[in-house]
Image (cartoon, helix red, strand yellow):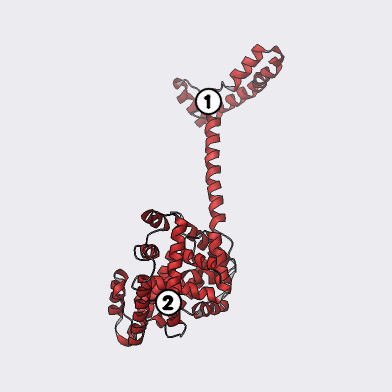
Amino acid sequence: MNNQPSISAELDEELVARVQRGDKKAFDLLVIKYQHKIIQLVNRYVKDPCEAQDVAQEAFIKAYRALNNFRGDAAFYTWLYRIAINTAKNYLQARSRRSGQFEVDIQDAEKVENAPQLHDLNSPDNHLANQQIIETIKEAISLLPEEMRTAIVLREFEGMSYEQIAEAMDCPIGTVRSRIFRAREAINEKLSPLLTHGEFR
Amino acid sequence: MNNQLKQQLSEFLDDQLDAQTALNLLREIQDDKQLALTLNRYAAIGHALKNTPPIFDDGTFLAAVSAQIQQEPSYLLPTQSKQTHEPRRYQVLAAAASVALVVFLGTQTLHQPTTRESVTNVALSDPKHLTTAARPNAKEAELAPLNERIHDYLQAHNNGVYTSSDPGLHQAAKVTAYSK
């Protein structure tokens, strides 16, 4: 659906308006909606999942405090994205006062922005855990039926819309929805044993 | 948690839900920790598929942000967004309509005969209107002596403009005025 971004923006607009009228719970919905993207974005800068969550929290709080200045000139996510990047940079700057690594950190973060495969986690344990998760996911994908594998790969790797996938796979859009969902669910089932032990965060 | 809700989570991550369904789903996620965990895992799977390190949140992130937001003051700003855009649109339409009306009336006025002409025409065509049509001329006649007196006064007291239209008399009139 070509109009999906505007639907998402419409929802954001509604939620922001509710927060501005005093409904704090509406801000929780914005957090649920964007926390994954914001944590990942911040992690590209700070390169530590735990720190990334702390910095992302700070970014959301800053966004709440600044919400009276948000007039909808830009999309809410774009505005939030800028706040998150500035918060991450400020965090790195504060960290640099301890280690003198600020310039290196920023340069690294900007390289990683353009090449996500260059991600590296600070802790060797974290690195190992994430490698195990990625291996499990790859294995789960290889075990998927062909049509589910193709659908999830086109969506996640190629970033194609449901319409484009339906066209590429020559099937109705409802089938694409169902295949992508079943693929995610199958991978989730393979991951559950790893995640329920609380080893990974 | 049923499969329909899970499928909605999957579609939500891909921005495939309409605004109302997405809003309802977000409320469900807010109240259902299992649903929130499933969303977090689906999102993490997506990141892992893109070779970015997945970050699994067990629900503490939202709880932490929400707790801090509760400590913050609430906003009580007047509604803006749609409600400000709509009146702006109407204001533009109203201005355009006003301009169109002025142009229309202006055009109509230009193409109409002057009032005196039209009154005369009406008077000529309909004798009943004769009295009404003659009224402006009668008033002018009433005012004529007064105008004449004003004209005379100005001729006597002004040294240039009102004295006479004859250039030959200008100088004499000025002299008269100085002598006074």
Mark 1 or 2, closer to the camera? 2
Q: Position of residue A55 (x, y in %)?
A: 42, 79
Left or right of A106 in this view: B144: right
Q: Residues within 10 Å of mark 1 (few under 14, many from 20)?
A: few
Numbered disc 2: secondary structure = helix
Q: Chain of mark 2?
A: A
Q: Position of residue A87 (x, y in %)?
A: 41, 75
Which disc, if any, is residue B57?
Answer: none
Closer-to-camera residue (A54/B91): A54
* Residue B124 visible from this viewpoint: yes
Amino acid type shown at disc 2 = Lys
Residue at the spot 39% in from the left edge and 66% down from the top edge: A145
Numbered disc 1: secondary structure = helix
Amino acid type shown at disc 1 = Leu
Q: Chain of mark 1?
A: B
* Viewport quadrant of the C terminus of chain B: top right
Res. B26 image quadrant: bottom right
Closer-to-camera residue (B138/A142): A142
Query: How many labels, in total?
Result: 2
Closer-to-camera residue (B152/A5): A5
Left or right of B50 in this view: B110: right
Which disc, if any, is residue B110?
Answer: 1
- Whether labels 1 and 2 share one chain: no
Q: Position of residue A147 (x, y in %)?
A: 39, 62
Give the distance between the C-alpha atoms of the residues marked 1 and 2, in whole angstroms.
Answer: 83 Å
Residue at the spot 28% in from the left edge and 75% down from the top edge: A107
Residue at the spot 49% in from the left edge and 68% down from the top edge: A33
Q: Which residue is mark 2?
A: A190
Q: Position of residue B97 (x, y in %)?
A: 55, 39
Picture layout, residue A102 above or below residue B28: below
